[in-house]
Image (tube, rainbow, N blue to C red):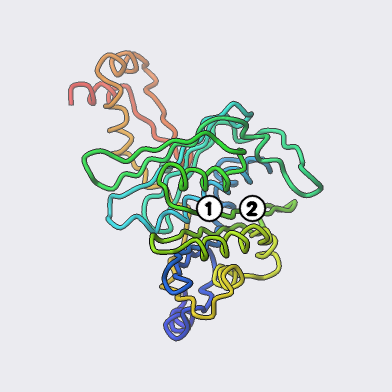
Amino acid sequence: MNADKIQNQLLDPRADPGGDYLVRALAYGGLVRAVAVRSTDVCATAREIHGLSPVTTAALGRLLSGVLLLTPDLEKKDDSITAIIRSDGPIESMTVVGQSVGRVRGSIRHPVVPGTLIRPGKLDVGQAVGRGQLTIVRDMGLKEPYVGQVDLVSGEIAEDLTAYLSLSEQIPSAIGLGVRMDQSGVTHAGGFLVQLLPDAGDEIAEHLESRVSGFPEVSYLMEEGFNPHQILDLLFGDPEIQYSDVTPCRYECPCNRKRMEQNLLTLGAAELASLAEDPEGIQLECHFCERRYRFTQNEVRGLISG
Ligand code: ZN
């Protein structure tokens, strides 16, 4: 964000800061909360890091965008939210971690799988994901993290996250997610999350349900030039909607050599001793950013005695 853009943002909470960002809003007199995100660069980065094929770009991109929508809940420095999908489709598993507001990273078991189309131009993400479970781990710095799990509804990600929020966390929610691509890569990606607050009555719930059910696909709207603010404007049709500050979003992996050492230590003495037998040492690769860390035989031995 350059100085002019920041200035615009201060003058107008609806100003588009450019690049990936998320915005929070309250609508219908504060009875409904919403988040919308533009995650085009985040999804393009994931595609590049993991060498994703089109259908895995769509699948992991949707999960990254979906977790971004949940990151405004991360209030403290070490809070995190992790979404894990394990399934019987060609992808097998995906993990996305939200580390702070607007920061995510993701990994996928099989980055390249053949895609099929639901209709021309529309990849069948549900087929690539298959049936299985979605697990969400919210680590809010308490003694125990909060863990919830639901069966996948369709493998299309947005419906699965919606089911998780509605069933496991009992917050009536609606989520829309989309990732669009052309030959060159990701052209548009984003999403929205809408949640009813406890005082919202049936009337607002029904009104919102009818607006959400007829709502165009997010990626289509983005292609038409809508930014996250404008997507929420269109969704709610509420001239009194209140936006709070925007947060820039990016793909970020906080891994480093120290953390990798700690991962090695969790293997236990016996496993480390067996790894220390290799005169070549070992090489670890981070699943989220594919950065490589080499440990010589002496360094592995040092960890054991350490
Ligand atoms: Zn990493």
| Residue annotated with mark 1 | 65
The C terminus: image quadrant: top left
- As shown in the figure, which amino acid type bears the numbered disc 1? Ser
Residue at image point 43% right, 52% down: 171
**252 over 23 or under it: above or below:** above
Crowd band around label 1 with a 10 angstrom C-alpha radius: few (<14), some (14–19), many (20+): many
Crowd band around label 2 with a 10 angstrom C-alpha radius: few (<14), some (14–19), many (20+): many
Residue 208, percent from left and from top: 56, 63
Residue at image point 47% right, 43% down: 164
Distance in Å between CA atoms under marks 2 and 1: 9 Å
Residue at image point 52% right, 65% down: 203
- As shown in the figure, which amino acid type bears the numbered disc 2? Val
Q: Is mark 2 within 8 Å of ligand 1?
A: no
- The numbered disc on residue 179 is 2
Residue at image point 37% right, 43% down: 255
Residue 107, percent from left and from top: 50, 39
Along the viewing direction, whichever of 19 and 269 lies nearer the viewer: 19
Residue 135, percent from left and from top: 44, 36
**224 over 296 or under it: above or below:** below
